[in-house]
Image: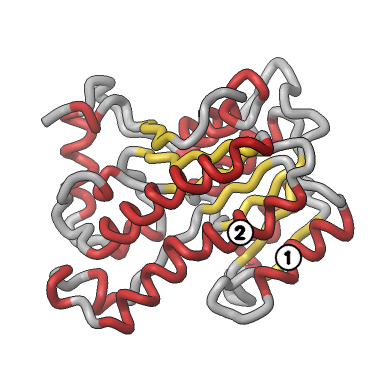
Amino acid sequence: MIPEVKAKLLEGKRGLVVGIANDQSIAWGCARSFRAFGAELAVTYLNDKARPHVEPLAEALEAPIFMPLDVAVSGQLEAVFDRVAEQWGELDFLVHSIAFSPKDTLQGRVVDVPQEGFLKTMDISCWSFIGMAHLAEPLMKRGGSLFTMTYYGSQMVVKNYNVMGVAKAALESAVRYIAAELGPKGIRVHAISPGPLATRAASGIPEFDELLNKAQETAPARSLVSIDDVGMATAFLAHDAARLMTGDTIYIDGGYHIID
């Protein structure tokens, strides 16, 4: 269900959303909020296995561009941006909501991480955002917004988050540098840091249910965040009302990150 809003505050804006896997994805919450505010969307799916789960969602969004994108496959990233350039000629915002670490890398101690697994984790979870920012820059002719997803485990040691915390810390640092470099062109950059969410990606983290319970019991709001909470807040940041906000890690977690 697309959230109901009273004003099409992003009407005329066009954006690319990367990372929708199913209707529980953070990227889906973002996409439907952007659409509810009137934006036109391009949507990607990981591979043929994922397509049946994502295609109905893309249709609900009335997405005119729907393409495969596995950032580990050479040429696919460039193909998506070429299509955006050909069909739209410009881009107003980008939502990067992908991360990956091999199971043996994610579930082991950071000190034991194999080099190959570390590089894979960094490539997909961090470098892919830098690559997308590079390709988005020339399309953001009137300025724009770049968003990526992070987590509190980038700043504090969170049990079982392990090497993904290292990758997210690098990602947040990249956000700050890219914001400084692209700010003169009117391009804003943010890392969005939701509280724990029961997504497919989170299912790979051991004892994740315990983390959810702790968040709900401890957060000042005494509530777990939803994908719609994340989506609506992210959509706001793409509006001109937020034009002087950039380079931040934005927590959408009911205040959980302020509690010791």
Tag in front: 2 or 1: 2
Q: Secondary structure at mark 2?
A: helix
Say whether residue 1 is visible: no
Identify the residue position indicated by label 2 in the image.
132
- Answer above or below: position of 88 versus 246: below
Camera sees residue 17: yes
- Position of the N terminus, as image quadrant, is top right
Q: Residue at x 33, y 46 (%)?
A: 151
- The residue at the point 63 percent across, 58 percent down is 134
Q: Is residue 84 above or below residue 250?
A: below
Task: Say whether residue 145 is left or right of residue 245.
Answer: right
Residue type, label 2: Met
Question: Which residue corresponds to the image point at 58% horizontal and 26% vertical from the top-left?
Answer: 236
Looking at the figure, which quarter contains the C terminus?
top left
Residue nearer the viewer, 115 or 236: 115
The image position of residue 231, as x and y in percent, is: 54, 35
Report helix, strand or loop for mark 1. Answer: helix
Mark 1 = which residue? 80
Marks 2/1: CA–CA distance: 10 Å
Task: Tell me residue 253's x, y (percent).
Answer: 33, 32
Q: Amino acid at mark 1?
A: Val
